[in-house]
Amino acid sequence: MSRHVSTLNVFFNGQFWTGVFENISDGKLSVYKVTFGTEPKNYEVYEFVLKHYHKFKFSPEIEVSEKTTAKNPKRIQREAKKQIQSTGIGTKSQQALKLQHEQIKTERRIINREQREAEKRRIYEMKQSKRKEKHKGH
């Protein structure tokens, strides 16, 4: 018996609202991702699916095992939150760019701190030299 399941998950990825269409048929998963931009209303998503579903180019099929038991929605939410926090969102290239960005940020902080300390030392030395100049005349 052939079983076909289609789901649509709409979520905010930090910049845009994104929809992920998943089709599972005969134990094979194919996916299509669409970016909505602003937060779509339910009727807008429904209308989009009706108009554009035949144009979707789903990914190549991947073998998956089907889940038969239903889970508590709150548990699913907690597990999804845990996964996102542990791995982060994005591809490996996006994660590499994020790592590079973090390294540049720490280097910039170190340089700025050194400049601030050098400026403080310079001002302190100027004050000390002025103080000595005042006392030389007596």
Image (tube, rainbow, N blue to C red):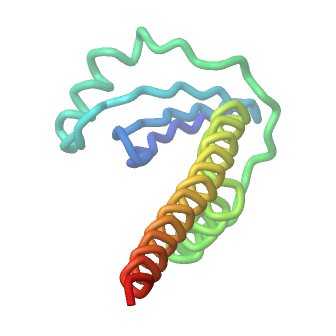
Relative placement, left or right, of 1 versus 23 is right
Q: Quadrant of residue 68?
A: bottom right
Relative placement, left or right, of 27 versus 105 is right
Question: Residue at 74% of width from left, 30% of height from top?
Answer: 28
Residue 57 in the image, given as x and y percentages of width and height: 53, 12
* Rendered-image quadrant of the N terminus: top right
Residue 116 in the image, given as x and y percentages of width and height: 50, 63
Question: Residue at 28% of width from left, 32% of height from top?
Answer: 37
- The answer to which of 125 and 100 lies nearer the viewer is 125
* Rendered-image quadrant of the C terminus: bottom left
**Outermost residue, front direction?**
138
Residue 84 in the image, given as x and y percentages of width and height: 61, 58
Q: Quadrant of residue 121?
A: bottom right
Question: Residue at 38% of width from left, 29% of height from top?
Answer: 35
**Outermost residue, top direction?**
55
**Outermost residue, bottom direction?**
138
Instruction: Decide: is 65 above or below 19.
Output: below
Question: Residue at 57% of width from left, 73% of height from top?
Answer: 78
Instruction: Decide: is 23 above or below 88.
Output: above
